[in-house]
Image: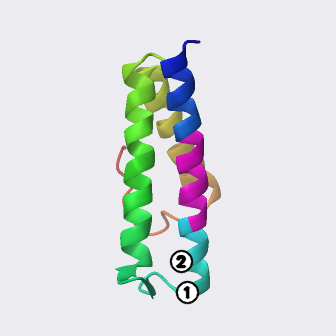
């Protein structure tokens, strides 16, 4: 891998950690809790957006493949439908 690919992966890794931290704040202080005039929801949205940007960059730079990544997301949703309560009593749509 080249320097650009390494940097993309490093930043993606950092963004994953920031998403984890933002989710922890939601659990500790609630989705509408505030810190420095920013709700935990807004902070989580920002961090998820940052991570999504890095995922798009990994696809753009052929670090990961778009179709395979989409298929993995679809497979995960299918598992959640089967094994979790997330989709109970609601129509499940494709990703």
Q: Is residue 95 magenta?
A: no
Q: Is residue 20 magenta?
A: yes
In the displayed structure, 14 sits above or below 90; it is above
Q: Residues within 10 Å of mark 1 (few under 14, many from 20)?
A: some
The chosen color scheme is: rainbow
Separation of residues labelled 1 and 2 (CA atoms): 5 Å
Nearer the observer, 73 or 30: 30
Q: Position of residue 45 (x, y in %)?
A: 38, 63
At horizontal 45% and vertical 27% (from top left) the residue drawn is 58
The image quarter containing residue 48 is bottom left
Looking at this view, is 89 or 62 the one in front?
Answer: 62
Task: Determine whether the residue tagged by mark 2 lies in a helix, strand or loop.
Answer: helix
Snapshot quadrant of residue 23: bottom right
Question: What residue did someone put label 2 on?
Answer: 26
Q: Residue at x 36, y 59 (%)?
A: 91
How many marks are shown on the rendered structure? 2
The image position of residue 1, as x and y in percent, is 59, 12
Q: How far across and how far down the image is residue 51, in percent? A: 45, 46
At which x and y percent is residue 66?
41, 23
Residue range (magenta): 12-21
Q: Secondary structure at mark 1?
A: helix
Look at the picture and state if 58 lies above or below 74.
above
- Please name the residue shown 36% across and 21% down the image: 60
Residue 73 in sight in this render: yes
Say whether residue 79 is left or right of residue 70. right
How packed is label 2: few (under 14 Cα within 10 Å), some, or many (20 or more)?
Answer: some
Does the residue at mark 1 contact the one at mark 2 (Cβ under 8 Å)?
yes
Pick out the residue farthest to the right.
83
Predominant secondary structure, magenta span:
helix
Q: Which residue is mark 1?
A: 29
Residue 78 located left or right of residue 91 = right
Split into 4 quadrants, where in the image is the C terminus? top left
């Amino acid at each position: 891998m080249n320097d650009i690919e390494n940097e993309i992966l490093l930043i993606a890794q950092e963004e994953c950690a920031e998403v984890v931290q933002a989710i922890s704040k939601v659990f500790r202080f609630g989705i509408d809790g505030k810190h420095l005039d920013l709700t935990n929801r807004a902070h989580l949205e920002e961090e998820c957006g940052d991570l999504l940007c890095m995922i798009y960059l990994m696809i753009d730079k052929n670090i990961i493949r778009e179709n395979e990544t989409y298929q993995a997301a679809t497979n995960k949703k299918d598992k959640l439908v089967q094994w979790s309560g997330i989709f109970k009593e609601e129509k499940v749509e494709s990703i």
